[in-house]
Structures are given as C-alpha cells and as structure tokens.
Image: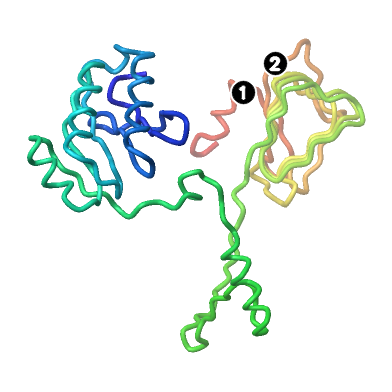
Amino acid sequence: MARGMCRIILAKRRVTLLRGRLDGLEVALCGRDLEEALAELEARLAEQPSFYRGASAVASFGDNAPSESHVTRLRALLSGAGIELRALGGSADGLEALARAAALGFEPSTAPLSESARSLVADFAGARDDIAQRRKRGEASVRRVRFEQENARPVELRLVDAVPTTLYNSTTLRGGQTLHHTGNIVVVGDVNPGAELVATGDILVFGRLAGIAHAGAQGNAEARIYAIDLAATQLRIATFIAADESVKRRSGPRPEAALVRNGEIAIVSLDRLGELQAPGA
C-alpha cells in the first residue's frame, strides 16, 4: 500500500483502514472515548511501527472536544511511527483555537454521516412509510411525472432505409443448405451441388460454386456473382437466368464473374472484367 493512501478509522474495538486522502492519512477519532481511542491507536501502530513512516496525517475529532493533553499525546504517538500530525479537524467548540495554539492546521468537518450510512447498511423504513402513506391517500406508490398537454409535441416517425450489409460465411455449404441475405454474401469455401445462395446484392465465393446462386434478388440487375471456380447448376441475376448447359466448359477452373450484359447473363474471366467496364465496351 502506498504511503498517504489509506485512512485509519477508530471504530469500536478496532482500527479499520478505509480509504486514503490525496494529501496523506486521516485518523478519525469520532464518536468514542478519546483515552480509549488513543490507547487503541498506540497498540495498532506498534504492530507496524514503520509502515506509515514519512506520511502526514489529519486527526478528525468530529464533535469530540479534545484537550491539549490529548493532542500532545496523539502527536507523540504519530511521531513515534514516523507520521507528522499536520492538522486537526472537527466541529467542536474551541478546536480551531487548540489547533492554532499547537501550530497545526484546522479543517472544519462537514455534516456527520448517520450510523447506517457509515456502516453501509441501507435503511428503507422511511421509504416504506412514505409508500404506505401514499396508498392511504389513494395515490400511486411512486410519483408520476405529469406533462402539460400544451407542452406536448407530436412525435414525427420516419421510415429509414436499412443499409445493406454483408453476410460472411467461412464454411463449405453442403447440398440442401441455403443462405438468404439482404445485402451481399461472401462464402470462403465451396458451394456444393444442391446448396443455394440468395442475395439482394453481390455474391462472392472464394472456392467452387457448383450450386444455385441468385444475386440481385430484389430486382438489382447491376448485381454480380464472383467465384474462383464458377460451375453453378443455375445462375440468377435479378430476373435473368442461366443454366449450366449455357456455360462453356473449360479445361480448368479460373476466377470468373457473372453479370447481365445485353439482356442476358454473361460469364467473363476476372482479368477481362475491366474491358466490359471501359467506356464504349
């Protein structure tokens, strides 16, 4: 534990380290006999005589009124453990004058916490009584916020078009499996015969496309189908259809794309795709 980052609380029968102050230690001597508290502090400091060495401390007395001898003894106890007493804190009459006489600073205390707040034990009695009184008066258990009608503003509802997304599938599709998606579909793997892909956008297959692929399913004729090995049993783009018998057989697989060209589906190799996109092609 870093020096100056803990708090010594003299609770009943023990000293409890709770929290630190940014500027040192706080020794709380509130709510109990000061002679007993000082004796307990002495015993606790003796257990770890050098643990707090080099730190400074503020002694908080609350509404206790220490005597000059109490302050002298406290200062000696802390000094013996290497702790400098630099200020007194509390609300008792005469405490500020006592601090000034001892050449110490003074910190006025804030309103003391209740016992339940100090022990972190929640007290719901007041809340329960308040709820019971409301029910007797016929009111709701919890106050409802009422909005004045004249201040109410109509809510305008707007339809927002969903942005197409991309469905990413990293496994091979077996026969009978289907992928339907509003947007693009990307498959890293094969699409075996009997499998089906349906997308409103493009379809990309990083593998063998041997099943059915339908791109632009909502009428987008600009959609395309790409595959490393394009051997589909059926291709569809928007309302256009191409069956496997219309696909020219090749000696080996190569990356290709299917797109609508002159009112029908055309299949071109990816290295020639740019020629179709050139002006005047």
Residue sitting at x 75%, y 20%: 189
Determine whether label 2 and label 1 are within 8 Å by CB: yes
Residue sitting at x 79%, y 20%: 190
> Residue 257 appears at what percent x and percent y?
67, 28
Q: Quadrant of the C terminus?
A: top right
For residue 138, above or below residue 69 = below
Q: Is residue 172 left or right of residue 126?
A: right
> Residue 113 appears at what percent x and percent y?
40, 51
For residue 33, above or below residue 220 = above
> Residue 33 appears at what percent x and percent y?
36, 39
Residue sitting at x 63%, y 66%: 128
Q: Which residue is mark 1?
A: 270
On the question of residue 116 being in view, the answer is yes
Give whichever of discs 2 and 1 has the lower sequence position: 2
Of the residues shown, which amino acid type is indicated by label 1?
A: Leu
Q: Quadrant of the N terminus?
A: top left
Q: Nearer the viewer, residue 126 or 74?
A: 74
Q: Which mark is residue 82?
A: none
- Element class at badge 1: helix
Q: Nearer the viewer, residue 263 or 80?
A: 80
On the question of residue 234 being in view, the answer is no
Occupied quadrant, residue 276: top right
Between the C-alphas of marks 2 and 1, the distance is: 8 Å
Colour pattern: rainbow
How dense is the environment of label 2, judged by Cα within 10 Å: few (below 14), some, or many (20 and up)?
some
Residue sitting at x 16%, y 37%: 68
For residue 173, above or below residue 80 = below
Of the residues shown, which amino acid type is indicated by label 2?
A: Arg
Q: Which residue is mark 2?
A: 254
Occupied quadrant, residue 160: bottom right
